[in-house]
Image (spheres, rainbow, N blue to C red):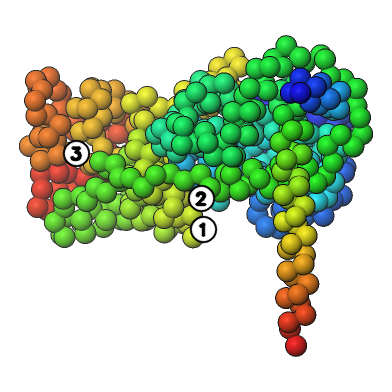
Amino acid sequence: MKPITSSFRDPHGFLATHEGKLYRVVTRLGKPDYDLFAASPLKANLESTGRLVRHEIIDRAPFEGDFYKILTPEPIPFISYPYEWSFSQLKDAALLTLTIQKEALGHNLSLKDASAFNVQFVGSRPIFIDLLSFEKREDTPWVAYRQFCQHFLGPLLLMSHHSPDFNRHLKNYLDGFPLSFVAPLLPLKAKVRPGVFMHILLHAASQKKHERGGGAVNGIKPGSFGLTRLLALVDHLLRVVEGIRLPKGKSEWSEYVPGYSKDGMELKKKFVSEVLDATKTSSVWDLGGNTGDFSKLVADRGIYTVSLDLDPLCVEKNYLSVRGNGKPILPLLMDLANPTPAIGWGHEERMSLLERGRPGLILALALIHHLRITANIPIARIAEFFSKCADRAIVEFVPKEDPMATILLSGRKDIFHDYTKGEFEKTFGLYFPHVIVAAIPGSKRILYSFSKA
Amino acid sequence: MLCLLTLICMLLVAFPAEAYLDPGTGSMIIQIVIGSILAAGYTVKVYWKKLKSFFQRKDVP
């Protein structure tokens, strides 16, 4: 049994792997709260509505140890992190957390943490993953209020008022943005809103005033913060979060219309479809997936598709287009020239992109000229990275003569001597010996289906 | 006045003994202030909803 490296803070339990299977272990210390939650109708309700990962109790312990219970959680196809979500993904995760807290209060339970890492996405559906987050409600203020504001409210406000990808900076703040960081960055028009004033500005001021006061308050006074106040607080947070919007805007790529001829686009779709049908893979990463047109072509075959793009508005548009329709597409924000690293304690609390699984195939359509010219990554390094991602790749080669590549090259010296059809084929051939090729009619672009075997 | 209110809040607030998450003293204290303000409005909202549903039920033949 090997504990998962991200699961060590809560003494009530942890996640572990054993012989390739994932388990959630409840410690003896976690027994009272686990029993309370397991017996509550809340658990059954959250599971039946798809808002909580289902867990199966294991009768015979698969490994040694003095534990209270060992459970197997329903698998999450691909783990993602809040710094990879679009605005609406983070907002939906925040609303899920608050509605669960509101319902929990009605069952005399409460969330003891409100970490954004407790939410995952199965396709476009947010789901709460930590069943050990529930504890008996006491008549005290909400212990996870600070964490909720740092993980959700602050980041959402900064995404709304600064840039839609402000959450990228959460990589530097694993416990969310400190409110003393958020408050001065907000414009006056945001600060004068009652919700922001209370939950961010007053909250930050109170934290500053009492920053050395941790040990000063220890006497429990039952009834100091009753159910009505807790419900009022959560209800207000719900309304504040619901009211945060992303300003209407367009980016260079969110409105991009590919310049293919009708025949060209048809061939591209046919080529990708035929490779997918022949490959019979169950997972695909669509690198540079834009708003997800080809991700949808993949997902329509029931293949779980992670659609990665650099542009936050493309990811947002992609997410909104699949939200609620059940397509197995997970849109995520990812700069492939600087993909998500492993971070946190011991460099192993949150996984890098490549540590999170290996798809059967990657799609890299109309991407390689951006990696080679804009990001200045040599073809050999691109081929090496693609081969680390998967054993199969569909790559669209966009030559220097292509109008889009010409734009990227204009005004700069052409130092990209390895960016030719011949060098591309030779270098990719070193990593992927098997290849199928098709020229796209009406353009100089070429599609390649590479495979290692 | 603010100091007095803060002092009262500090006496009232308490952290659960076994909490693994640091709730933050300032975050706990401010909730008492914010919660008190919001609770009044929330109570009115809840009773208004109850009253509305009571009359709406009566409308049904």
Q: Which amino acid does label 2 sit on?
A: Ser
Query: x, y (%) of residue A301?
Result: 42, 58
Q: Which disc number belongs to residue A124? A: 2
On the picture, is A162 further left or further right than A22? left
Q: Tell me if residue A165 comes above or below residue A347 in the rendering.
A: below
Earlier sequence position, callout 2 versus callout 1: 2
**Cα distance between the residues tagged 2 and 3:** 30 Å
Front in this rendered view, residue A87 or A278: A87
Q: Tell me if residue A194 comes above or below residue B50 in the rendering.
A: above
Q: In which quarter of the image is the C terminus of chain A?
A: top left
Earlier sequence position, callout 3 versus callout 1: 1
Disc 1 secondary structure class:
loop
Where is mark 1, residue-wise? A324
Q: Mark 1 lies on which chain?
A: A
Earlier sequence position, callout 2 versus callout 3: 2
Q: In which quarter of the image is the N terminus of chain A?
A: top right
| Residue at 53% from the left image edge and 21% from the top image edge | A181
Disc 3 secondary structure class:
strand
Where is mark 3, residue-wise? A397
Front in this rendered view, residue A402 or A242: A242
Residue A73 appears in which quarter of the rendering?
top right
| Residue at 10% from the left image edge and 35% from the top image edge | A406
Q: Which chain carries label 2?
A: A
- Whether tag 2 and tag 1 are in contact, CB under 8 A, the answer is yes
On the picture, is A353 further left or further right than A101? left
**Cα distance between the residues tagged 3 and 1:** 34 Å
Disc 2 secondary structure class:
loop
Query: x, y (%) of residue A218?
Result: 87, 20
Question: Are the numbered discs 3 and 1 placed on the same chain, yes or no?
Answer: yes
Q: What residue type is labelled 1?
A: Gly
